[in-house]
Image (spheres, rainbow, N blue to C red):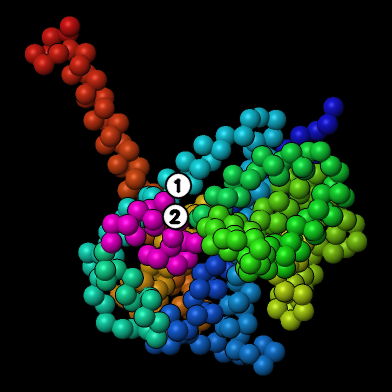
Amino acid sequence: MQKSPNEIDNFLTPDDTKIMKGIAIICMLLHHLWFFPNRIPGGGVEGIFTLFNAPATSYLGIFGKICVPMFFFFGGYGVYKSSYGKPYDIVGRLKRLYFAYWKVFLIFVPIGFLFFSSQVPYCSDPFIYSRFAIFSPRELLSNFFGFTSTYNREWWFLISYVFALISFPLIRAVIDRYSARINLFIIVIVSLLFAHIFPGLKTVTALGVLGNSHMYLRFFCQIAPYAACFWMGAIVARNGLFDRLHGSMKQHGLLNPLVDIAVWCMVIVMRQNEVGDIFDVFFIPVLTVASMDLLNHVKLLKKGIWYLGRQSTSMWLIHPFFCYYFDVPAKIVAAPHYAIPSLLVLIAMTYIASVLLAYFWKGVGFVFQKANAVKINFKHFGVSGEKQ
């Protein structure tokens, strides 16, 4: 009998996955804060050195975009492991995703219209400070369901991830049918298709309105091979590739703090200077093994990143309001003026807001439960208080 992914891959536990999502959310905040000075009050934050003749903030800021393929990768990894041997619950998956999104939407979008609808220009990008200047019911509904992201440009991830979840039954069918080697070859082909073929097809006149298809543009014309990373995460889960990679690196003496840091440096340089993001499907598993080994030597940091990973979904949804769209918190984030202090401020503000939001919705749920209990008691005993 073939072993399940949970039996053959012991390297990455659910808590470890949260840690990697914590690293991903740090990369996301770093990317949005450091790489877009035109969106930041005061023209952005400053670094203290350069890398390859570029400011370190810009160089590392663009690398931070690896957060998106990381989230797709660990999404595919987690979905495959949790649904192995069971019917795939697409409704439940979409429900959890949209509920997490709506919990932020229903708080922060009204705040935007109530308190930040007439902001003075505080950065050089008008899109940032004018998001809530004009209200449109149609725009509200479109953003509510994730079809557009005009209230928060960084929410574009939602609908792309929805399409990845919808495609999972097909991905699982292919993965379960073929060996790890064939699946890795398929991933290479899929990466090439998403990076070079599908985006070009939208301009082919003979294909008609393909270039105007919302589904085609969102799923097949992504600016990086995100869907391939989702697929790769499922392949790694199915075939226990983390255990194999970890064992191989350990056997060859490649697991120690110095090598772990060197692996990160190598991937950053290769991704930025040489091969680009098309190799993220292979970079992310290597970075995962190196990161977990490094953090096993720094327990306190590991625990802190784990806490961030628990809140990573809410932090993704919330942080652009503090970083860009609401002038007061954006100015607080930019106030230190230097890259690292500003990043720490943004992490702290976003994490605290995520935790408070979770407590708020727990409170709302508690109130509804009590209200329903009271209603049931009234029906059971009748208005007079006597049992019917």
Residue located beneath label 2 in the image: 146
Q: Position of residue 355 (x, y in %)?
A: 40, 54
Q: Is residue 273 left or right of residue 120?
A: right
Which residue is pictured at 35% across the width and 53% down the height?
141
User: Is disc 2 surrounded by few (<14), some (14 to 19) or many (20+) residues within 10 Å?
Assistant: many
Q: Give x and y (percent) for residue 12.
A: 70, 48
Is residue 148 in the magenta section? yes
Compared with residue 265, is residue 278 higher up or lower down, i.e. above or below?
Answer: above
Disc 1 versus disc 2: nearer the observer: 2
Which part of the image, by quadrant, shows the C terminus? top left
Drawn side of residue 248 relative to residue 235, left or right: right
Q: Secondary structure at mark 2?
A: loop
- In front: 341, or 376? 376
Comparing 160 with 66, the one in front is 160
Tell me which residue sits at (22%, 64%) in the image.
Answer: 114
Q: Amino acid at mark 2?
A: Gly
Residue 24 makes an appearance in the image: no
Is residue 9 in the magenta section?
Answer: no
Q: Pick out the residue farthest to the bottom.
A: 53
- Mark 1 to mark 2 CA distance (whole Å): 9 Å
> Up-down: is 314 above or below 180?
below
Q: Which residue is drawn at the image coordinates 13% and 9% (left, top)?
A: 386
Q: Mark number for residue 98?
A: 1
Q: Amino acid at mark 1?
A: Tyr
Q: Residue furthest front?
A: 206
Q: Is residue 98 visible?
A: yes
- Rendered-image quadrant of the N terminus: top right
77 on left or right of 266: left
